[in-house]
Amino acid sequence: MELTYHTDYGLRVLMYAGAHGGRRVTMREIAQAYGISLEHLRKVVHRLAQHGYLITTKGRAGGLTLGQQPASIPIGDVVLAMEESMAIVDCDRQPCPLCGGCSLKTVFDSARQAFINQLNTFTLQDLLGNTQTLGQLQRLNRSA
């Protein structure tokens, strides 16, 4: 299973915003820091704001800040919010003669849930608590 860029960028946006404390950061600043398309980033930020992970402010002094404390943002929940589908296999993609009586889907569903549960043992605060990561995030702002 591979997570989409949408999820990857969403996690990076949260890390960037969290690394800069309460300061409002701009989408342009984040796009430059990570080398991400501003248009793609708008969609990511919109989804994060819909789920309450970010607070966005429009206008000249606008920008975005975290909508919750980093310790209350479980990584697995963010992944679930950002991914369109977490299915490991799509049983409906092709007609399958085992459909409706296959135990493989149950195994994959269990594995997916274990993956999310493991991710949820970490919060945004855990990621920001790594001094090397935090330092790199803060340096991004200076080089953007």
Image (cartoon, rainbow, N blue to C red):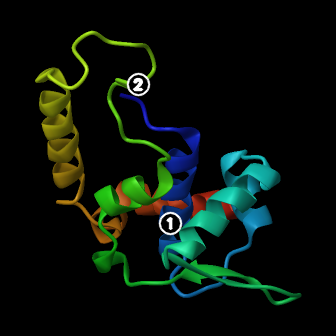
Q: Residues within 10 Å of mark 2 (few under 14, many from 20)?
A: few
Which of 11 and 127 lies nearest the eye of the viewer? 11
Can residue 72 be seen from the camera position used here?
Answer: yes
Which of 122 and 138 lies nearest the eye of the viewer? 122
Horizontal relation, residue 73 to residue 48: left or right: left
Quarter containing the C terminus:
bottom right
Residue 5, picture quadrant: top right
Can residue 143 be seen from the camera position used here?
Answer: no
* Above or below, comparing residue 74 to residue 109 in the picture: below
Q: Position of residue 94 (x, y in %)?
A: 43, 14
- Give the amino acid at mark 1: Leu
Residue 14: mark: 1
Residue 116: mark: none
Horizontal relation, residue 66 to residue 112: left or right: right
Q: Secondary structure at mark 2?
A: loop
For label 2, the residue is 92
Mark 1 or 2: the one toward you: 2
Q: Residues within 10 Å of mark 1 (few under 14, many from 20)?
A: many
